[in-house]
Amino acid sequence: MNSTDLKITTASGEKASFSLEKIGRSLKKSGADEVSIRQILHTIESELYEGITTREVYNRAFELLKEKDSVLASRYKLKKAIYELGPTGYPFEKFVGALLAHTGYKVEVGKVVQGICVTHEVDVVAQKDKVKLFIECKFHSEQGRYCNVKIPLYIHSRFRDIENHYRAKHDPEEFFNEGWVVTNTRFTSDAVQYAKCIGLTLLGWDFPKGAGLKERIDHAGLYPITVSTLLSRREKEFLLSRDVVLCQDLVKDKFFLDHLGVSETRKKKILKEMRMLCTVQKKDE
């Protein structure tokens, strides 16, 4: 079958044209070399069939890359790893806070703030110099979900309530400069248009172009523990419940592996993987 004529089923259930080039770009971003990329794409192309899903293609590419380099495979599975931060959304909030802290912001997660009508819990408050950001995180644990216009509408109304309270107090210390909405998925065109109109900053998986969540994660080299190919699902859930969200968190608090009863040999392998994920981006740069 000619791959250029093939229709693939996306996570949202829609049909789309298959693109080997898109898979190749993702593999390249993970750090895979050109020879490995060509070999993986050749294997995938030989196994295609009409109606294959994006998830099936992704899983196959991941396994083929894992056979060559488990750390690069971990980077390749970043998007799926972010979905695995659920279901509560709190680890995602902490993860977003860590990304901002990496760029010099002082961060508070889950801060209760007074509005003129009611109190609000702001997911992330980040401050650097005279800039203070109020950030709401909209986490989805399922692929194919979009943030529609109702999300920025709702969040804008909350931020206005907080803003009105601060204006009434005339308290510049408590005032915030920017309101953000951060999601691990994508925004609809109406959501983008509305946010632009009222001055709300949106940060999605690949939005804005070239500076989305994925690019920020890769640039910072701050990967969640859920990218690990060595930790089991149960172990990841245990660590997340103890606020161990980043690979660097586990390197620092490795005693949690003892709590899990991980053998010394396996612990060394896991920590080696964590350290490599913490440093791999620096090598790329």
Image (tube, rainbow, N blue to C red):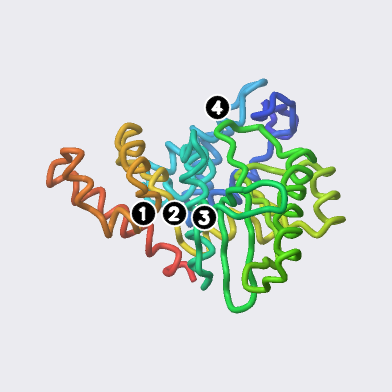
CB within 8 Å, label 1 to label 2: yes
Q: Quadrant of residue 279?
A: bottom left
The residue closer to the viewer here, 99 or 111, is 111
Please, is residue 144 above or below residue 139 in the view?
above
Which residue is the site of mark 1?
A: 247
Q: CA distance from mark 3 to mark 1?
A: 27 Å
Local SS, label 2: loop
Which residue is the site of mark 4?
A: 47
Q: Which mark is residue 223?
A: 2
Which residue is the site of mark 3?
A: 34
Mark 2 or mark 4, earlier in chain: 4
Q: CA distance from mark 1 to mark 2?
A: 6 Å
Q: Residues within 10 Å of mark 3 (few under 14, many from 20)?
A: few
Local SS, label 4: loop
Q: Residues within 10 Å of mark 2 (few under 14, many from 20)?
A: many
* Amino acid carrying mark 1 in the image: Cys
Q: Nearer the viewer, mark 1 or mark 4?
A: 1
Q: Quadrant of residue 129?
A: bottom right
Please, is residue 174 above or below residue 34 in the view?
below
